[in-house]
Image (tube, rainbow, N blue to C red):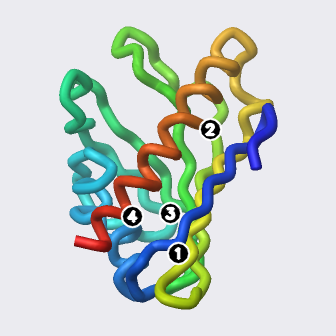
Amino acid sequence: MTDSQRIEKKALLRAPRTRVWRAITNAEEFGTWFRAKLDTDFAPGKHLVGRITYPGYEHLRFELFVERLEPETYFSFRWHPHAVDPKVDYSDEPTTLVEFRLEDAEGGTWLTIVESGFERIPAERRALAFRMNDEGWGIQLDNVKQHVAG
């Protein structure tokens, strides 16, 4: 489901829930499929900073704030969506909430990724942030799917 305030992507990953959980909550593994180098592990309340490793975007800082970790079920963080201009300080802007939900499925694990809160993003960059993240989460879902299958 996609509307103007919420992105939702869902896929069946051909891997056990434990494997998918590790891929999305281990900072090193997350960085591999997401293409980011993070400075520390995920833990509730942690502020993580790193760099994007995707070719052409290596100059960009990657930052997120871990909200919740419910083992093998739910992981969420907040971030500044599409914060790609190195000359802009996004720290005073509201964040969006990114949620990963895992459910058992026949032959694997359902992974649902939801990003919400776009209505709080400044109007001048809201539509672009939404469009880019909507496209980006489709790509990232494919990336994590391939990561856990390999």
Badge 1 vs badge 3, beta-carbon distance below 8 Å: no
Task: Give the secondary structure at mark 3.
Answer: loop
Q: Position of residue 146 (x, y in %)?
A: 31, 62
Question: Which of pointers 3 and 2 indicates the residue nearer the eye?
Answer: 2
Q: Is residue 5 above or below residue 30?
A: above
**What residue is shown with label 1?**
69
Q: Amino acid at mark 2?
A: Thr
- Residue 58 occupies quadrant: top left
Q: Give the CA distance from mark 1 to mark 3.
A: 10 Å
The Cα–Cα distance between marks 1 and 2, rounded to whole angstroms, is 18 Å
Q: Is residue 44 above or below residue 91?
A: below
- Please say if 132 is above or below 15: above
Would you say 77 lies left or right of 2 here? Answer: left
Name the residue tied to disc 2.
Answer: 95
Q: Secondary structure at mark 1?
A: strand
Residue type pointed to by label 1? Leu
Return the residue at label 4.
145
Coordinates of residue 29 in the picture (x, y in percent): 25, 65
